[in-house]
Image (cartoon, rainbow, N blue to C red):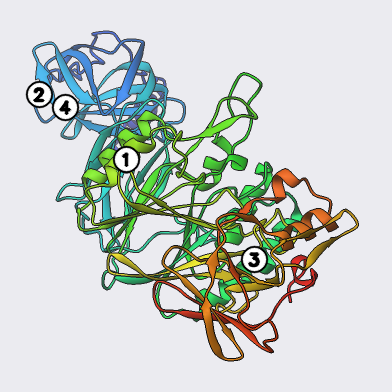
Amino acid sequence: MTRRKFFILLVSCWTAFLWALSACGKEADVPEKEPDNNGDDDNGGSSGNGEEKLIENASVPSSLNVTVGEPLVVNGVGFLTGDKIKITFSLDGRKSYLCEVTAVTQNSATITVPNMDSGRYNFVLVRGDRTAPIGTSTLTVSVTDCYGQITDTDGKPVPGVVVSDGFSCVKTDADGKWRLKKHDDAGFIFYSVPETHQINVAAGSNAALFYASINNPAQFNFTLAPLPAVENEFTLLAVGDPQVASTAEVNRFNNETMNDLKTLTGASAKPCYGLFMGDMVADHPELLAQMKIIAGSSDMIYFTTIGNHDKTGGTTSSPRNADRFCEVFGPLDYSFNRGNIHFVCLDDVIFSNKDSYTAGFEDHQIEWLRQDLSFVPKSKTVIVYYHIPLRNSNYKNRTALLNLLKPFAKAHLMCGHTHYAEHFDITSPLTVHEFIHAAACGSWWKSVINGDGTPNGYAVYEVKGNHLDNWYYKSTRYSKNFQIRLHWGDDSFGGTYGTFSYGQGHKIVANVFNADAGWTVAAYEDGQFAGNLVKIATTKDEWARGYHLGVLNRNPDNYSPNNKHAYLHTLVNPSAQTIEIRATDRFGNVYSQTEIVRNLTNAGTYG
């Protein structure tokens, strides 16, 4: 190559290099434009190569109130069917939602508001691989419709599951999907666990988890694990009033009640489910979370209802509320299914201020129950549980509730609240049995007995098909066969603050803890049948009063309930050497007792 050619080549290369460098610098100086509301070339305008605009005059208002699941109209000319609109949270760009255009007019496009939070959002048209800015708007998002899907652990839809917000009920369709109009006062979305699937539980506890809180989200998806088969036989445990007020009482509940339950459920060959009858705490909401974990420490999955002492707040003119309880345990009114039993939980505590309350159900609860039961086969048995006994005739909406139970094969009612045991037969407007459970805490953890002498404990029900095949009362730290305590009718019990006697002479008083109208109680003297005992219509349990009032000096108004299951035996042979009382329940189980208790040792501590 000649010198002249080399020089020309060098100059040409250097010139090209400088030109390229200059071009790069110009491009870097051009800022990227933010979306705006102007109808200029940024709204789908040409790129300078004659390309046609996507849309013209596109815009959204600077601020909008929108509702999840409802239509949102975007203005603009040139929208097409099949377009999408991308909505991106403008602060960080990480939250974005790609929305299908559901309707197009000459001057607008319609999308459905996605499940999103309130905030400032950029709107961009997406057509294939091309985009065009639309504008920016501050959205205030609210929720009226809630929707979702229930699937199993394999991703298959679960149809026919009832979903509710506590005010209305719907059922999942063939695809497991559901949608309902959320009530303004609703706090949860929950489903009625079907008998075909397992019950989900909370982390760290066997507390049932079948709900989600409604904050802003509108979409609620749930996953259920199928059962190998419907559980037509299972054990139901009903626990009345733990009612703890201190760490010491929490420890007693754990070491006494729960340890006893762990032994029973751990030895069971059948699934075990528990119902807590309210008053998990005694006006100490700070203990609720701890109680949730401890109550869920056995092999039974459990549900709970709310009691009067679980509600908090209130003033002289405003009622207590359930907010703290719901934070821990979820909705107040709900249902679930096991085998051929449909369970319904209801809040029946109505406060008028911070101190005064009555029992009953509000009208909206009855309407919710009507809807819930409309999905239940009439061949099922319905068990309704709540806190305060329904036996009282002045109970709000009592008749309305009972009428809703009429169409079903069988119904049972279960509650707590009283701190004594009672079986009450309601006869109108239908015949139904109410199980009023003694308290796990007995007489507020001051002893190991309830005010009627029933030991601290819980009830056990054996469920088979759609009926209760057997039931018994399980006294804490005693054998299941311990069902009777005997006293002489002329003995006195007490201490520094007084003594108490049944005043029945030299006769046998039998406290048969779980007796109902279907039991017979018989006496045997020296091995020979000596007649059936006579039920005492009403009496105070003087043995329990002797301890709570005579020894502890407690308030008689709280520690003197009537004993509804006391029987009296007049000796045929006053000189009999052995006396045995046998109680036979409605299922043919026979319980026997020969020990006659003459002191208060086992009232304050376990034997």
Q: Furthest residue to the bottom?
A: 527
Q: Nearer the viewer, mark 3 or mark 4?
A: 3
Q: Which residue is mark 3?
A: 455
CB under 8 Å between callouts 1 and 3?
Answer: no
Is residue 26 among the parts visible in the rendering?
no
Identify which amino acid the numbered label 1 is placed on. Answer: Leu
Give the Cα separation between the discs numbered 1 and 2.
47 Å
Q: In the figure, 365 relative to 290: above or below?
A: above
Whichever of labels 1 and 4 marks the residue nearer the N terminus, that label is 4
Left or right placement of residue 351 versus residue 127 in this view: right
Q: Which residue is mark 2?
A: 80
Identify which amino acid the numbered label 4 is placed on. Answer: Val
Q: Number of numbered discs present?
A: 4
CB under 8 Å between callouts 1 and 4?
Answer: no
- Determine the image quadrant of residue 50: top left
Q: Residues within 10 Å of mark 2 (few under 14, many from 20)?
A: some
Q: Quadrant of the C terminus?
A: bottom right
CB under 8 Å between callouts 4 and 2?
Answer: yes
Q: Which residue is mark 4?
A: 101
Left or right placement of residue 163 versus residue 110 in this view: right
Q: Residues within 10 Å of mark 3 (few under 14, many from 20)?
A: many
Q: Quadrant of the N terminus?
A: top left
Q: Residue at x 29, y 70 (%)?
A: 232
Is residue 441 among the parts visible in the rendering?
yes
Give the Cα separation between the discs numbered 1 and 4.
39 Å
Of the pair 545 and 183, the residue shown nearer to us: 545
